[in-house]
Image (cartoon, grey):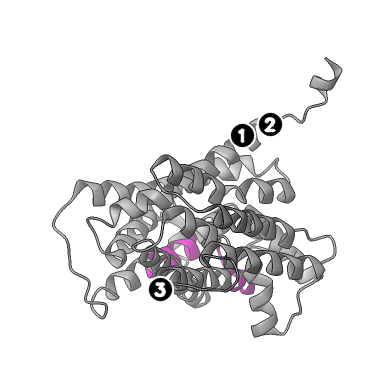
Amino acid sequence: MKSISRLPRISKAEAVLILITMLWGGTFLLVQHALTVSGPMLFVGVRFAAAALIVALFSMKVLRGLTFLELKAGVFIGTAIMLGYGLQTIGLQTIPSSQSAFITALYVPCVPLLQWLVLGRRPGLMPTLGILLAFTGLMLVSGPQGASLQLNSGEIVTLISAVAIAAEIIMISAYAGKVDVRRVTVVQLATASALAFLMIVPTQERLPDFSWLLVLSAVGLGAMSAIIQIAMNWAQKSVSPTRATVIYAGEPVWAGIVGRLAGERLPGIALLGAALIVAGVIVSEMNGVLPPVNRALLKKMAYAKPSERRLLCAVKHMSRDNFLLS
C-alpha cells in the first residue's frame, strides 16, 4: 500500500494538458484527410480566419485601441505563422502525419540554434545537446538506413516550417511587454489567414468544390484553438513549465499513435529517430544552465502548444502587462 501511495499523482490540471496534447496530436491526421478535398493554402486560410473571428468576438472592446506597434508585431508574427503552418500543410500532402508531427517538433531545439545564427547568442549546454539529439533523430526518421540525411520534398518543407515556427517564437519575445496580447493575437491570426488566401494565386492552387469535410475540419480546428485556450489558461496556472514541457513533448507521440491506428507504419529505425527527437525537445528545455534570455524564452515555450496554434497558444495565456517574459 505504501508503494502505491508513493506513485506520482496526476492533477486535474495536468490531466487537462494531457488531453489537449492528445487532441492536437490527432489534428495532423485530420488535416491530412482534409487535404483530399482542399489545397493547403485555402485550408490554412479558412482555418486561421475562423480562429481570428472567434478571438475577435471576445476582444471587441480592446481592439479599438490598436497601435501601430501592435499592428506591426501582428503582421510580422502572422507572416511567420503562415509560413510555418502553410509549409507544414503542404508537407502533409506527401509524408505521413506521424512523420510530420515529429519533424515539426524540431522547432523547439531550433529556437536556440536560430538565436545563435541570427542574434549571435550562443546556446547553452542543454540546448546544444538537444539540437544534437534532435538532428540525429531527424536523420533516422528521414534516412532509410539512418546513415545519411536523405530528405524528400515533403520532409524539406516540413523542416522549413519548423524553422519558421521557431522564428515566430523569437519574434514573440522581441515584443515582450510592449503590446496588448488580445489585439496582437487578432492581427496575427488575421494576417496568417489573409496571406494564405493570397498565396493561392502564385501557387496556382485550384479552388475545390464545396465540401463539408473542408468546412468542418478548417472551422472546427479554428474553433478548437479558441476553446482549448480557455482550458490551457486555467490548467497552466498550477502546472510548472518543466512538467508542461514534458507533457507537450508527447504531442508527436500521440500523432504517431493516431497515425498507426489509421494504418500508417513507420519503420523501426524511424521510431528510434522519433524517440530521439522527443528527447531532444525535452533536453533543450532543461533550462537550469541556460543564460537568462534563453531561460525566459524557453520557459514560455513550455507553455506554448507545439502544433497551431503555436502563437495563439503562446500569446493567449499570458497576462496583458506581461506579454512573454514574466
The secondary structure type at the circle numbered 1 is helix
Which residue is outermost to the top?
A: 1
Q: Which amino acid is tagged 3? A: Ser
Image position of 215 (left or right of 223): left
Nearest to the observer: residue 70 or residue 86: 86
Q: Which amino acid is tagged 1? A: Ala
Among the 4 quarters of the image, the one containing residue 284: bottom right
- Of the 4 image quadrants, the one containing the N terminus is top right
Q: Is residue 273 visible?
A: yes
Give the answer, above or below, for where 61 lies relative to 261.
Answer: below
Query: What residue sits right under mark 3 in the picture?
Result: 153
Q: Does residue 178 show up magenta in the picture? A: yes
Which residue is outermost to the left?
A: 209
- Point 48% across, 62% down: residue: 185
Q: How many labels does the image show?
A: 3
- Point 15% across, 54% down: residue: 210
Do the residues under discs 1 and 3 have CB atoms within 8 angstroms?
A: no
Nearest to the observer: residue 294 or residue 323: 294
Query: What residue sits right under mark 2 in the picture?
Result: 11
In front: mark 2 or mark 3?
Answer: 3
Q: Position of residue 34 (x, y in %)?
A: 29, 53
Query: What residue sits right under mark 1 in the picture?
Result: 15
User: What is the spatial separation of the Cα atoms under label 2 and label 3, in whole angstroms?
Assistant: 42 Å
Q: Position of residue 60 (x, y in %)?
A: 41, 55
Q: Callout 2 environment at 10 Å: few (<14), some (14 to 19), or many (20+)?
A: few
Range shown magenta: 170-191
Do the residues under discs 1 and 2 have CB atoms within 8 angstroms?
A: yes
- Point 66% across, 59% down: residue: 281
Nearest to the observer: residue 16 or residue 179: 16
Q: Callout 3 environment at 10 Å: few (<14), some (14 to 19), or many (20+)?
A: few
User: What is the spatial separation of the Cα atoms under label 1 and label 3, in whole angstroms?
Assistant: 37 Å
The secondary structure type at the circle numbered 2 is loop
